[in-house]
Amino acid sequence: MQGVWVMMMVEESLKIERDAKGDVKAGLVLVDIVNGFCTVGAGNLAQRQPDKQISEMVDESVRLARAFCDRKWPVFASRDSHHLDSPEPHCIAGTVEAKLVPTLQWLENEANVTLRHKDCIDGFLGFVEKDGSNVFINWVQSNKIKADVIVYSRGCATFDILTNTYKDVVTHPQELMHHIGLYVA
């Protein structure tokens, strides 16, 4: 019961706008929709059983990606990809974990799609090149995406790690972290 109260308090205190209004020059950003997070049993941090929130997020992401690609609108997709010795080994570079989920692998052949591996939790920092440029900033500028950032809540999901689910991994309650993530975005 305490969890319900906490969720109600968070939703009331941290309001998020759920519907976008008006026309915008849009780009679609897909973040880490990889097997290692979204495919049951596909890695150390992958879901262990089907998860409705993650399944809906993948389905909505596929739907949006198809709509954007049909119109030749810009799409940016990050793929979590780490070295074997990274803390909490997951989405190891070169493995199936670090690949886009099967229903999005077609993006690799689309001319309007920018794909980028990242090896840190902060994608923005993960896109900094050796020369100091940032692949994501360059993508936004070259596609003339100006002002609004719209986070489509059904196109977002986060994972659920309960206490003692994995050794040495911090608890991450899905519903609470999802709402806070949408608010921060």
Image (cartoon, rainbow, N blue to C red):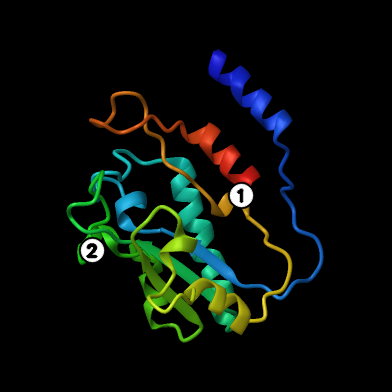
Furthest residue toward top: 1
Q: Is residue 119 left or right of residue 4?
A: left
Where 151 falls versus 111 (above or below)? Answer: above
Real-space Cα distance between discs 2 and 1?
Answer: 28 Å
Query: Is the N terminus in the top left, top right, bottom left or bottom right quadrant?
Result: top right
Q: Amino acid at mark 2?
A: Ala
Front residue of 102 and 140: 140
Disc 2 crowd rating (10 Å Cα; few below 14, some 14-19, many 20+) is some
Numbered mark located on residue 93 in the image: 2
Residue at mark 1: 153
Residue 75: % across, % down: 53, 74
Q: Earlier in the sequence, mark 2 or mark 1?
A: 2
Disc 1 crowd rating (10 Å Cα; few below 14, some 14-19, many 20+) is some
SS class, disc 1: helix
SS class, disc 2: loop
Residue 141: % across, % down: 62, 80
Q: Amino acid at mark 1?
A: Ser
Furthest residue toward left: 84
Front residue of 93 and 59: 93
